[in-house]
Structures are given as C-alpha cells and as structure tokens.
Image (cartoon, helix red, strand yellow):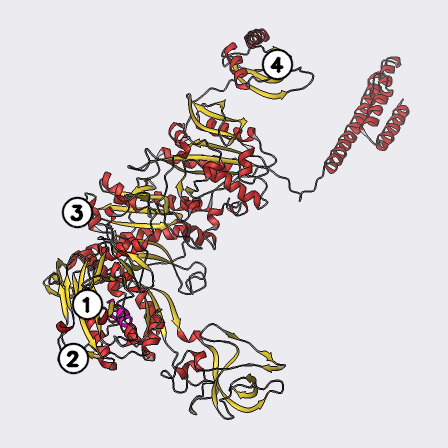
Amino acid sequence: MLEKIENILSSASSKIKAVKDLAQLGDIRVKYLGKNGEITALLKSLKNYPSQERPTAGKYINELRQKVEKLILDTENELSRIQKERKLKEEEIDVTLSKASLMRGGLHPITLAKNELVNAFIGLGYDVQEGPEIETDFYNFQQLNVPKDHPARDMQDTFYITDHILLRTQTSSVQARTMEVSKPPIRMICPGKVYRSDDDATHSPMFHQMEGLVVDKGIDICDLKGSLDEIAKSFFGKGIRTRLRPSYFPFTEPSVELDVSCFNCNGNGCRLCKGTGWIEVLGAGIVNPVVLEYSGIDSKVYSGFAFGVGIERCAMLKYGIPDMRFLFENDIRFLRQYK
Amino acid sequence: MKVPLSWLKEFVDIEISIQELADKLVSCGFEIEEIIYMRDNIKNVVVGKILTLEPHTNSNHLSICKVDVGESVIQIVTGANNVKVGDLVPVALDNAVLIDGTVIKTGELRGVVSQGMLCSGQELDLTEDDFAGAGVNGILILSKNAKIGQDINDIIGNTEVVLDVDVTANRPDCNSILGIAREVAAVTGKELKLPEMTYRVNNESVHYYVTVENKAFDLCPRYMAAAVKNVIQMTSPKIIRDRLKAVGVRPINNLVDITNYVLFELGQPMHAFDIENLSGRKIVIRRASGEKIVALDGKEYKLDNSDLAICDSEKPIAIAGVMGGEYSSICDTTTTVILESARFARDSVRHTSRKLNLKSDSSQRFEKGIDYISQELGMKRALALFDKYGWGEVVSGCIDEIKESYEDRVITYNYQEINKIIGKEIPKEAIIDILNALTLITTSDGNILKTCVPNYREDIVGVNDITEEVIRIYGYDIVEANIYSNTKGGMTPEQMRMEKLKDIMVGKGAFEIISYSFIPPKAFDMLNVEENSDLRKAISLSNPLGVDFSIMRTTLSYSMIKTIAYNLARNNKECRLFELAKIYLPKSLPLTELPVEKYNLSIGVFGEKEDYYTLKAIIDDIMLIFGIEVSYERKSLSYLHTGRSASILANGKEIGVLGEIHPDVLDNFDIDKKIYIAELDAEYVAQKGIDIKPYKAVSRYQGMERDLALIVPIDMAVSQLLSQIKSGATSILDNLEVFDVYQGKQIGAGKKSVAIKLFFQEYTRTLTDNEVNLEIENILSKLKEIDVHLR
C-alpha cells in the first residue's frame, strides 16, 4: 500500500514537473484526481482493506491527494503567470508612436492677453463695461475734452461714417458713457475693438484697447501708480520695475506713460527696448477735471485716474510676436501656437 | 521736431552729453525718436596723401595713384587731372558711403585694381562757399594742415548731432528750437538766451510800400507786414543750409531759406511776397469767393468762403497759412519783398488744408496753434537776419493788424492742491522754483500762489495743468505706489457666459480667429446674397483705408470663409475655427442714430473628418451645455448648399444657421474643398443660457434598452420621426438615439432604414418586460400614422 502511494506520488510529481501548459495539467488532474483517477481509485479501494487498517491507509491516501493537489495548484499558478506574461509581451506596442486625437483648440493671443489683463483688474475690484464701437463724435471726442478741430484729433486718424458718427478711436469713449450714468465710486475697465486709419508692422486699422477708469474721493497719482504697477507686474512678471513719464492726453491732466523695465534684457538695453532699458506699455493720467464736469461729476469733491492699454502691444511683447499684421491673418499654423 | 544740437546751443548752454540731454527731455515729457549723427551720412572717407601718380596703360584719361591713407597705402584709379603727387585729398575707402548713399567698393578699372575713390567737393555735398577749393572741377584738394587718415567729417565740419524730439499735441510752442531750448533750460538749470533781434532800418516808411486791410479778424487775429528793399538773392551760407537740411528742409535761396529758418527756430511761419506782383500794393485778408489760385506746388486750387485768402486789391495771392501763390512769389527779378508774419485761426487752416489735401510746414504749425507773441519775434528775427547778412535794406516800421491786445493768464491757487493731486509733499519753494524756470512766473503769499502763464502756454488753464508742469520737472520718482482696490467687481453673468462660449469652442478643438470688422462691398456678391437682402444694408465708412475695408459687416460668415480660403491656399488642410465678434445693423441708412451692435458666434470647420453633422454636433453641445432647447429646420440661404443647410430655432425663433457652403460660393472664393459654417446669435445664448441646471434624480433601478429598425419614407426628417416616437410614448421613455441610417437595394425605392435605440427607465421601481412591450406597441402604431414600419 505505502509502496503504491510512493509510486503514484513520484510518477505524478515527475509528470507535473514536465507539464508545458494548462491543458496537460488538466489531463494530469483527471488522471489522478478525476472520477476514475488513480488516487480516486485508491480511495475507492479502501473498502477492500481490513477495517482496522482503513484509518491509517485513508490518512496516507488523503495526504497523497493533498500533496498532488498542491503540486497541481502550484504548477497551475506558475503556468498562468507565465501565460499572462507572454500575453503582455505579445501586446507590446511602440510607446513612442503618436496617433491623432481631438486636441483642445485655442484662444487667439489677443484674447489670451485680454483675459489676463481683465482678470488682474477684476481681482482689484473693477467692473467690466462695454460700449458701442460705432460711436458718436460727442462721446469719442467732445466729452473727453477734444472739441472739433482740436489738434489732438490728429493724434488719431479717425474713420468717419457721417459728420457725427464714427468708429471709436479709443475705448475712452466708454469712460464718458460710464461717468454719465454711474455715481462715484467708479472702478471699471472696458476692453474692446477700436479703429484708426493706420496700417503697418506696428499699426492695424482695427485693434484692441482696454480702458480703465477710477473715480472716487481723494484719488491721486500714487493711487494711479500703485494700481498700474500691480497690473504690469501681474502681466509682465513680478521682477519688472515701472516708471511714470510725462505725456499728453486731452482727457487727463497730468498725463503720463507707464514704462516697464525691459523684461528681455532686464533693463540693460537691447533691441526690444531700443537700448533704453524701458518699454512703453500704456498711457494714463489724472482725469482732467473738465472731463468730470462734462459728465456731471463734481470735480471739487471727486478725482480720478484713467488709463488705456493697447492689447495687441501687450500680446506682442509677451509672446514675442514681431508684426501686428500676423495677429489678423489668422493662419492656423500661427494660431496653433497659442493653446 | 528735429533739433540740431549746434542750433540749440545758441539758445542755451549744454554741458551734458547728448545721451544725458536726451534722457532729461524724456523725463520731462519729450520722447526722443532718434539721435541722428549727421556724420553717419559720410562713412569711411579719410584724408589721403598722393604718393605716386602714373598714367593708366589701358586708358588715355585715367591715372593710377598710390595713396597713403594712414594705416596703409592703397591703389586708386582716378579720372581726375587736378591732382599731383603730395596733394592731400578726401579718399573714399572700400565700403565707404557718400552723402547720396553711394557705396564705394574695391573694383577693377580697365584691368587695374582700384581700392577706393578720390572725392570731389560735390561728392561731399560742398560748394566753394562752404569750403575753400570745393568748387573746383575735379578732386577737392585739402590744405596741408589736414592729418593723413583723419575722418573727412571732422575736416569739413559734418559733425552735427540732431535730436528727433516727439512733441505732444498740447505743446505747439515746442515745435521750435526756442521752445525746446526753454524746456532744456528749465531741466538743466541754465539760462535761456534769445537770438539777435535788432536790425538797422532806412528812413522810409513801410506804409509807403504796402497797406494791409484785415476783413476777417476771426480767422486772422494778427497780421504783421514789413518791407525789405534792394534784396540780394544768393545761396545761403553753409550754416543755414546745413541746419535746414538737418531739420528736413531743402535749401532754395537766401530769401526762401530765411523764412524757413525762422519757422524752425521760433515756430513762426513766415511768407515773402514780391511787391511787384501785389496789385494795388495792398494786402487784403478776407474769405475767398470762389476764386482759383495756383499755389507754389504748381497746382490750381479753388477757394470758397470757408477758406481764408491773402489777397491783393484784385485776387488771392496766398492760401492763408497753407501755401503761397505762384504768381506773387519771389523770383529772380525780385528786388523788394513784403514779409508776412501772421496768426491764423487753427481750425481755419485745418479746414482748408484738409479740404484741399494740401499740407506744409506752416499749415501744420498753424493747425497745432501759434501764440500771439511769435509774430513779433519772427518778424524781428527775419529782419535781423536780412540786416546781419546784408541781404537787403530793411524799411522802417512794421504793420501790425491785431484784433485785441492779449493778456497773460493768471492762475491763483493753494500750493497744497498740487500735492493733493500728486499724493506726495513737494515743498512750496521747489514748486515756485520749477515754475519760474519754465517761465511761468510765480509769486507766493503764504500758501497761495499766483502763476502768470505766458501766451505761448495756452495749454495751462488750471491747477491740474500746473501740477503736471511741477511733477514732470520734479520727477515722477517721488510717486509711491498705492494700490487702490476694492473687494467688489467682476463680470456680469452674460459676460461670463460669453467667455464660457469661447471655452466650449476651444474644448471642441476650435481655434479663435479675430478678423477685421470691415469687409468689402463685393462680399455680398461673393456670398451670392440676393439684391434685396437685409445683409446688404450695411454701414459704409466715408474715409476707408481702401474699398476692401469700407463697410461694417452684417455677417461674420464672409470673414470666416475668407479666413478658411486663406488657410487652404497655404496648404492648411483641416481645422475648426470660431470667431465671437460684433455685427453692425443700421436702424436706417444713412445713419441718423447709432446702429445695433450684436455679438455673433461664427464657426467654420473643414478637412477630411468634418461634415455637416460634425458641425451640428458642436452646436448641439453648446445648446446642451447652456440648457437651451433648439430644433433644426431645413432652410436655404444664398451662400449655403440648398440640401445641406438649416436654421437653428429656439422657442420658434431663428437664432442661427448652419450648413455646407454652396459650390458656387466656394468657386467665388477659389476654394476646392467642402467647408461648413455656422453663425449664431451669441447674445441670445448669453442671455438665455442657464449656468446651473435643476437637479434631476439618477435612477437606482435597472433600465431597459430596445433597438428598433424602422423603414421610413426617404425624405422624412429624423427629427419628425423622433418627435412622433415621443408622442407615442409615456414618461418611461427616458432617452432615444439614432445609431444608423441606411439606404440601399434591400430597403426598396423611396425608403430608408433608421435604427433607433430606445432607453426606458422608471425612477421608483424596476420595469417589467410587459410594460416595455406595450410601450413599443404604442409607439409602432403611432409610427404607422406617418407611414413608418418595422423593418
């Protein structure tokens, strides 16, 4: 009996060791453990043994069965591990290959620059206003202290529709409209399209500006400088410095230009800043009291500051775009660069 | 305004470098466009000594010389015959640039290498008057003092440096050397010096020569006239010619040059008439009455009573402030000139200059504004120059027709008002010093200041203006940054939805374009738009840049197709594009009131993967995201494919269109690929869009799916089929979608097969098969009504 068990165990274990796949292993399982298997037969043959030997014999046979089952199970695990690995190996792909997918599109660089500026001002508590692009002479010029035949009109070549209706040359027209309907305190910006009859590498007949206006009690140049300095830093980078330089706009007095230190050369002078170390980014000033009065705001009580930013200029500076006309060609190869 | 440094130095001492001077001007409000070094006009021309001179073996008139140019000895072939061994001459070296832009290169002349060129006086832009020996017909022979190798610019005095100063529109007084000098004096703390203004006169009276009658004081508040007799006409001295050239004016002769010289020096336009051509020896200032005049540019102009004319007793002799007449101008035979120094109203000059499309240095200055003082300064200076150079005999007296006596403006204010605007404390004494340096004479009485503003500073009317004067000189460096902010602010919900619309498009893989708001009138023809269509009711600009930019668009579609055509022509084969921009719809034409401006969204898709349905899917998604229910109805539009276009309806109202571009329109744009575009009312979407949709329960019970393959009449729209299904179903029909449409032999003529997946769902319990079967039966019987059957 014991001898028989030993034989079965040694033949089973050598057969199991030689197994190549799960199917063979299944056959072996049937051969030994199946209904008509050798071990099953051995168990069935127990009834032929004398009753006092049965428990011991049964115990041996069961041990045999457990051993064989374990061998089969271990081999099964090993085989399925190898099989999985082989499958993964077979499914190997070239991980460096690219396939097309529906890519995200992108906003126009002008919109990207505009959004950045708008968000910065919203953070400082400004409202976003809009106004008509086809505007009256009254709001575009007269309410801003530029009467008819004022020499300042030459600063901007205007597209006219009738004698009194024109394409706005500046988003400043929205200043006049806002002050007419709002009471101070006023904090607003107005991004939008403006038009001047100019067309070259740095001018386009249609371009975008963002106007800003603050009117409150006690507004002074320090307020102007602080707010614009903050915005310039948020747009061009924390490291830049700003300076105010005297300038002229009919609707502000005093008027200034805001220069930022050249972010390309860190103010040392390069081609971008024409060797000056400074780049002009926007015009601003203390709202001319005359303009406040025109709009029915008491200039004895209130003062304000206003500014206007050229959005194309900001986008061109920030993204290094050399020619303004590129912005309006809408060549996809250009647009795809801005995601 | 171009400012030659040597000229400026006559008015104010300058002890700082040109760069420091430029920086000072920038800091006080005058941008410097450019610093021009006149010596850059002549480069690589040096003094050379002729060492040998031999005839050219291959030519009778050429010679070969060896020239010592300092660092080396070079060989030059020359045609000149006035040079001899030992002469010092100007030598243009290899890569030299002459004043007319000619570049001299090493080359061969008749087989002999020539490493440069010997220069004549003319080639260096010199006449005998300018430089002794320059008038010789041949090479300029320099004096023996010249140093071999020395830059020729230093020998001939071509060393001027010119500042190109940007003068803002509020400072017309600075369109002159004097005006800039006044600023320089203030920022450098130097004294302002005025030029020579005195002259000798003869014992005749100007009144004997000419009378002046001013009939239009409103347009000409001041008119001065003086006479100079026995004038000599000649070339002006080099200093005058050089300065005029440096400011961009061509020297003519001394009489013309004097008027220009005074114009640039003091800002006062001057004009000279030949007395022989003044009929009645009379000058009448009046509005024109339809006369014609040939101006100095040789062209004829017609003047009407909106134009101011300077006339003699019969006719106009000059267009006031704009240009003189040819007839009355000085000529070779002129012996007595009448000089005009006037102040014309800026809007009058502006009007006439614009109307005639005629600009001049003088019209540009009058338009910007000339003060009351300049006429006198200009006249005195011009007469002083005549006398100084001995170019004529100044007749005693000066006619001065002036409307009213002018007074300097006095502004009284508390100096603290200035500091309130700035937000920082500038001491009272510093304020007073700055204002006085700017010739704004200021006195104080305690905190109260009185500033006397001279007539040439018309821009200063109030405390804000005075503040600007103080701060621009004191410097903006003192201003501290104070962030004015508040917690409130932001976009309106509509504005945010506009931004969201763009974000959705970007998520759909589309790129934003920005195109011009103006389009050509032919745009509508290219879109095959009907003659009576509202689209054609567009606003025209009266002064467009060109016809292609002449009307304000009433549709974005033209620009979109144009952009796609542009890209296809550049082999950009596929893309999704969008634009969110305004269209301009007039209430009436011509415009009497402002038009309606409305934001539209235009979408364009093209490429192999795109078709009508990929475009429609974008719109479906937009509407789904904004919670706007839309339906589509077949619609043909002039520029869309009649069988592949639809209008987008919301609440029965059209809010947009979409479709494939009509083949004829593709031809008009030279496009040979299919493109698909949509244009919709973005404001409707922004106004009606829902940001947060109401909560809808998610069922915890299993739903059931059923597929139906239906035989449908071929021309029946799927939308009709779906709504018929819905009308036959109860609320347990949760969703349905078309997953296949098929036409073919198996289906039979006039039919198509549509496969639909129906999804049934109950929110409180699990559905039974029976329920769903019943539902399907009801749907099928409803479908029979419209001739739709199970396949």
Give the alpha-carbon distance from disc 2 to disc 3, as whole Å.
Answer: 59 Å
Q: Residue at x 82, y 30 (%)?
A: A21
Question: Mark 2 or mark 4: which is in front?
Answer: 2
Left or right: A194 in relation to B752: left
Q: Are marks 1 and 2 in contact (CB under 8 Å)?
A: no
Magenta-drawn stretch, dominant element (helix, strand or loop): helix
Q: Nearer the viewer, mark 1 or mark 2?
A: 2
Badge 4 sits on which subunit? B
Q: Which residue is mark 4?
A: B710
Task: Report, in whole angstroms, how far the alpha carbon at label 1 lies from the one at label 3.
Answer: 42 Å
Q: CA distance from mark 1 to mark 2?
A: 19 Å
Chain ID of residue with mark 3? A
Q: Amino acid at mark 2?
A: Val
Q: Name the quadrant containing residue B190.
A: bottom left
Q: Is residue B336 left or right of residue B452?
A: right
Alpha carbon of mark 1 to alpha carbon of mark 4: how far? 96 Å
Q: Nearer the viewer, mark 1 or mark 4?
A: 1
Percent x, y of residue B532: 41, 30
Same subunit, tags 1 and 2 = yes
Query: Residue at position x 60%, y 21% from top?
Result: B739
Please state which of the two labelled residues, at mark 2 or mark 3, is closer to the viewer. Answer: 2
Residue carrying label 1: B375
Q: Tell me the magenta residue range.
A: B259-269
- How packed is label 4: few (under 14 Cα within 10 Å), some, or many (20 or more)? many
Q: Which residue is mark 2?
A: B201
Foreground residue among B324 and B431: B324
Residue beneath disc 3: A301
Amino acid, disc 3: Val
Look at label 1 and name its amino acid: Gln
